[in-house]
Image (tube, rainbow, N blue to C red):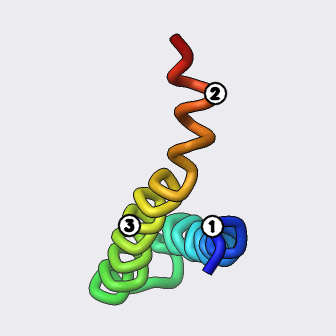
Amino acid sequence: MKKAKALKILNAFMAVDFLILVSTAITHNFWLERGIYGILHAVPGFLFAGMTVLHLVLNRDWIKKNYMKK
C-alpha cells in the first residue's frame, strides 16, 4: 500500500476515534456510568495513541524536511 493511501485511511480512523474520545469526555458525567466510561474512553484513547505514533512514522520524511533543517 502506498504511503499516501495509508495516511488517508489512518487520518479517517484518527478523526473518528478523536470524535469518540471527545464525545465520551463530554458525556461521562451525564449519561455514562463509571464502568462503561472506562471502556469507552480508555480503549479509543490507547488506539489514538498508537495511531498517532503510526501517523508520525508515516510522516517522518515530511517532519525531517520541515522541522529538522540544519
Label 2 to label 3: alpha-carbon separation: 23 Å
Label 1 to label 3: alpha-carbon separation: 17 Å
- For this rendering, which residue is in front, 5 or 26? 5
SS for tag 1?
A: helix
- Whether residue 8 is visible, yes or no, is yes
Q: Earlier in the sequence, mark 2 or mark 3?
A: 3
Q: Which residue is mark 2?
A: 66
Q: Quadrant of residue 35?
A: bottom left
SS for tag 3?
A: helix
Q: Earlier in the sequence, mark 1 or mark 3?
A: 1
Label 2 to label 1: alpha-carbon separation: 18 Å
Q: Could you tell me the amino acid type at mark 2?
A: Asn
Q: Could you tell me the amino acid type at mark 1?
A: Lys
Q: Could you tell me the amino acid type at mark 3?
A: Gly
SS for tag 2?
A: helix
Q: Write the residue at 67% across / 77% down.
A: 9
- Whether residue 23 is visible, yes or no, is no
For disc 3, the neighbor class at 10 Å (few under 14, some 14 to 19, many from 20) is: few
Q: Which residue is mark 3?
A: 50
Q: Write the residue at 52% across / 69% down.
A: 21
- Label 1 with label 3: CB-CB less than 8 Å: no
Between label 2 and label 3, give the one nearer the viewer.
2
x, y (%) of residue 58? 53, 58
Between label 1 and label 3, give the one nearer the viewer.
1
Q: Write the residue at 49% across / 51% down.
A: 56
Q: Quadrant of residue 16?
A: bottom right
x, y (%) of residue 5? 71, 74
x, y (%) of residue 1? 61, 81
Give the left or right position of residue 46, taking residue 27 as reference.
Answer: left
Q: Which residue is mark 1?
A: 3
Give the left or right position of residue 9, taking residue 20 as reference.
Answer: right
